[in-house]
Image (cartoon, helix red, strand yellow):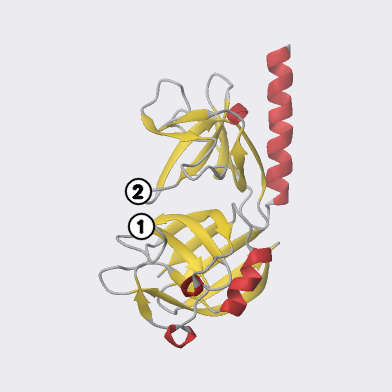
Amino acid sequence: MKRFATLVLFAAAIAVIAAANSAHVGQAATRTDGVVVETKFPAAGSLTVNSVVVRRKPTTTARKVTTMNYFRPDYRVQEILAVSAVTAPNGTPWYRISVPGRPNGRYGYIPAADAAVSPTKSQIVVNVGRRTIDVFHNGKHVLHGKVAVGAPGMETPLGHYYVGAAFKPVNDPFLGVWALETSAYSKLSDWPGGGVVGIHGTNQPQLLGQAVSHGCVRVSNTTAARLKTLAPVGTPILIKA
C-alpha cells in the first residue's frame, strides 16, 4: 500500500511538471529500452542525498556514468537538470538528467527519490553562426543580443546544456557585470581555471559579433545584467550552429 501511494504521488508530481512545461515539451512516449513510459520536460533542482550514482539505464545494475555529489568541488550546491521522468519495469521512478562536464552531451538516470526538481521557466538559445543570444521566458521571447563566440580551434561547443552557477565577478572586469557558468566544456575557455564554457559580460564590447573567445559566450554588460533575473541557475541552454 505504501509503495502504491508513493507511485501515485510521483505520477501526480510528474503531471504537474509536464503541464507547467507544455510550452517547452510535455509529452509521453512508450519505449523499449527498459523504460515503461517517459514523460519529457525540463526541470531543475538539487539532490536530496549526499551523492548518487548516475546510470546508463534506469536500473541499479546498469553501467555507471559518473557519481554526482550534493556539493560541487567549490562547495556550491550541484544543480541538476532533469530532461524527463521515466518509470522502470519494476515500477521505480527515475529522472533522466543532463550530466555536466567532459565529454559534452552525456545523459544518465538517477532515482527520482534522490532529487528535488521543479519546472524551469526560461531557456537560453545561442546561435553560433549568427552570433546571437535569445532568451525565452514562459514561452515568450524576452531578450535578444549580440555575442562573441569561440575562435577557430577553440569553438564554442554545440549542444544542450544548462546554467550550473551564476555570480557577480569581483575585480575581474573582463567577465563583465554578471556571469553564468554552463555545464559545457571547451578545449580552453576564458573561465577561471579554464575549460568551463561561461556566458558572461565583457569590457571589450567592440569584439561582440566576432569569433574571438576561447569557447565562452561573451555578451554586452546590458545583456548580462538582464540574464541575472531572466536565466537563474538550472536554466536550459541550447547552443546551435
Q: Residue at x 46, y 27 (%)?
A: 34
When asked about the image quadrant of residue 165, the answer is bottom right
Q: Quadrant of the rendered structure where residue 48 is?
A: top right
Q: From the viewer's perspective, is residue 94 above or below residue 84?
A: above
**Residue flagged by tag 1: what amino acid is it?**
Gly
Residue found farthest to the front:
171
- Report the residue at 60% width, 76% height from top: 223
Residue at which label 1 appears: 195
Residue toward you, 85 or 99: 99
Residue 105, above or below 53:
below
Q: CA distance from mark 1 to mark 2?
A: 9 Å
Task: Answer with left or right where residue 1 lies relative to residue 122.
Answer: right
Asked whether, in this view, residue 89 is left or right of residue 190, the answer is: right
The type of residue carrying mark 2 is: Arg
Q: Is residue 90 or residue 159 the one in the foreground?
A: 159
Looking at the image, which is closer to me, 14 or 72?
72
Residue 133 is marked as: none
Pick whichever, 198 or 80, lies toward us: 198
Q: Position of residue 84 (x, y in %)?
A: 56, 42
Eye-nearest disc, 1 or 2: 1
Taking the spot 57% from the left edge, 42% from the top edge, the residue there is 77
Q: Secondary structure at mark 1?
A: loop
- First along the sequence among labels 1 and 2: 2
Most distant residue in the top direction: 1
Pick out the residue farthest to the bottom: 206
Residue 49, x across and y down, in percent? 58, 28
* Quadrant hosting residue 212: bottom left
Rendered residue at 50%/34% (across/down)? 69
Callout 1 crowding tier (Cα within 10 Å): few <14, some 14–19, many ≥20: some
- Contact (Cβ within 8 Å) of mark 1 with mark 2: yes
Location of mark 2 (residue): 102
